[in-house]
Image (cartoon, rainbow, N blue to C red):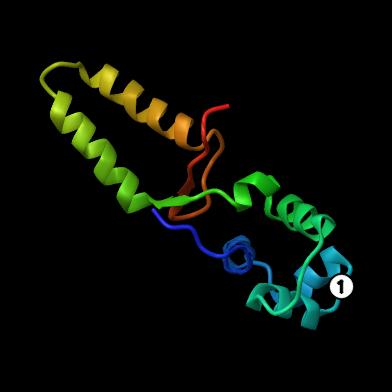
C-alpha cells in the first residue's frame, strides 16, 4: 500500500487518463505552467482546482487522497483468501468473495493497475 503526495497523484492520474499538461490546463482554466507547478508540488492549489481535477479524472476529491493498493497486491490478497478457503467454499462463493473484496476496496472501476481503498462509511 502506498500513499503518494497529492501533487504526485494528480500527475499520475492525469497521465493515466491520457491527458497532457496543455489539455489539463484548458480544462482547469489555468496556464500549462501552473498545472506543471501544481503537479511538481511547487504551487499551492485551491479546493476548486482539486474539485476540477477530480471531475476531469472521473473521481472524487476524497478518492485522490485515498491510499492505494496495486493490482498485484490485491491479487496476492485475493489469492491468499481463496487458497485459505479453497476447500471450504465453492467456486461460486470464491467469485463472490473476490467481487466483495473489490467492491469494498473500491466501489467503482479502478484506473489501470491501481485500486483505491476507502474506509467504511
Q: Is 8 positioned to the left or the right of 56 in the image? A: left
Q: Position of residue 33 (x, y in %)?
A: 78, 83
x and y, in percent, of residue 113 in the image:
43, 55
Q: Which residue is mark 1?
A: 30
As drawn, the residue found furthest toward the left would be 87
Total residue callouts: 1
Q: Residue at x 58, y 63 (%)?
A: 9
Look at the image and tell me whether residue 59 can be seen: no
Q: Is residue 47 left or right of residue 102?
A: right
Q: State whether residue 33 appears in this view.
A: yes
Q: Residue at x 46, y 36 (%)?
A: 105
Query: Please, what secondary structure does the residue beneath circle 1 have?
Result: loop
Vertical comparison of 14 with 116: above or below: below
Quarter of the picture containing the C terminus is top right
Farthest residue toward the right?
29
Q: Callout 1: 10 Å neighbours few (<14), some, many (20+)?
A: few
Residue at (57%, 62%) from the top-left corner?
16
Occupied quadrant, residue 98: top left
- Find residue 46 and report its horizontal and vertical position in percent: 82, 61
In the rendered view, would you say 73 is above or below 42? Answer: above
**Residue 20 drawn at (x, y percent):** 69, 74
Q: Is residue 116 above or below residue 2?
A: above
At a point 60% along the width and 68% down the height, the residue shown is 15
Amino acid at each position: 500500500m502506498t500513499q503518494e503526495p497529492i501533487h504526485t497523484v494528480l500527475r499520475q492520474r492525469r497521465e493515466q487518463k491520457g491527458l497532457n499538461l496543455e489539455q489539463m490546463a484548458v480544462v482547469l482554466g489555468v496556464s500549462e505552467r501552473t498545472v506543471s507547478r501544481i503537479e511538481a508540488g511547487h504551487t499551492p492549489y485551491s479546493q476548486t482546482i482539486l474539485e476540477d481535477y477530480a471531475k476531469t479524472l472521473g473521481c472524487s476529491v476524497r478518492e485522490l487522497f485515498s491510499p492505494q493498493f496495486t493490482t498485484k497486491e490485491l491479487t496476492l490478497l485475493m489469492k491468499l483468501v481463496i487458497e485459505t478457503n479453497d476447500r471450504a467454499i465453492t467456486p461460486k462463493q470464491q467469485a463472490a468473495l473476490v467481487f466483495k473484496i473489490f467492491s469494498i476496496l473500491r466501489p467503482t472501476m479502478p484506473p489501470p493497475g491501481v485500486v483505491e481503498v476507502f474506509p467504511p462509511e
